[in-house]
Image (cartoon, grey):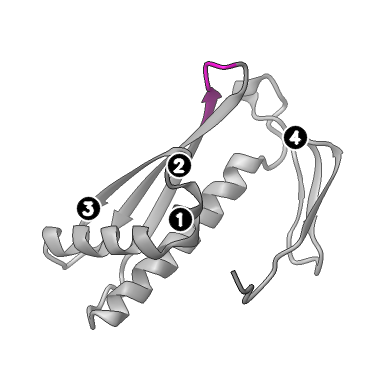
Amino acid sequence: MEALYTAEALATGAGRNGRVATSEGRLDFTLAVPKELGGSGDGANPEQLFAAGYAACFHSALQTVARAQKVSIADSSVGARVQIGSNGEGGFGLAVQLEVVIPDLPHEQAISLANAAHQVCPYSNATRGNIDVDITVSDD
């Protein structure tokens, strides 16, 4: 792959109870283990960052395929939920649910756009076959 862009981040401290920042300083977060996993919940966590990145990336892919098909999806949105849990083998795994909302478009056409976006989105391509990704499409 020929890289078109490279993002760089550094995690310091105690991992999930530390800090993460990007090299140019645009993102700088205190991290904390979520309360549900026994932590304080007083900071961001990797699953939140992954959910935000996947939602934004998938929405961009959705807009790209809609533009290519000359379809307007101006009021669309993509929400992402990232879950972490035991993988049953002593480690942890992730699962993702994406909610694609495209108002004012026939449901079948909206599903077709979401499926096309899932084929071009870099996050979808990176996770395909590795974690469960469930996509639902609605108009509200």
Position above or below: 43 against 8: above
Q: CA distance from mark 4 to mark 3?
A: 34 Å
Secondary structure under the numbered disc 1 in the rendered image: helix
**Residue 58 percent location from the top left of the image:** 42, 60
Query: Badge 1 is on which residue?
Result: 125
* Near-viewer residue (136 or 93): 93
Secondary structure under the numbered disc 3 in the rendered image: strand
Q: Residue at x 25, y 78 (%)?
A: 72
Pointer 4 or 1: first along the chain = 4
Q: Disc 3, disc 1: CB below 8 Å? A: no
Judge the density around disc 4: few (<14), some (14-19), many (≥20) Cα neighbours within 10 Å.
some
Q: CA distance from mark 1 to mark 2?
A: 17 Å
Question: The disc labelled 1 sits on which kind of residue?
Answer: Asn
* Near-viewer residue (131 or 83): 131
Query: Badge 4 is on which residue?
Result: 16
The tag on residue 138 is: 3
Pointer 4 or 3: first along the chain = 4
Secondary structure under the numbered disc 4 in the rendered image: loop
Judge the density around disc 2: few (<14), some (14-19), many (≥20) Cα neighbours within 10 Å.
some
Position of the C terminus by quadrant: bottom left
Membership of 37 in magenta stretch: no
Pointer 3 or 1: first along the chain = 1
Pointer 3 or 2: first along the chain = 2
Specify start and end residues of the magenta stretch as a single range. Answer: 84-89
Q: Residue at x 55, y 56 (%)?
A: 53
Pointer 1 or 2: first along the chain = 2
**Residue 26 percent location from the top left of the image:** 74, 66
Membership of 86 in magenta stretch: yes
Q: Nearer the viewer, mark 3 or mark 1?
A: 1
Query: Does residue 88 appear to the left or right of 78 in the view shown?
Result: right
Q: Residue at x 35, y 67 (%)?
A: 62
Secondary structure under the numbered disc 2 in the rendered image: strand
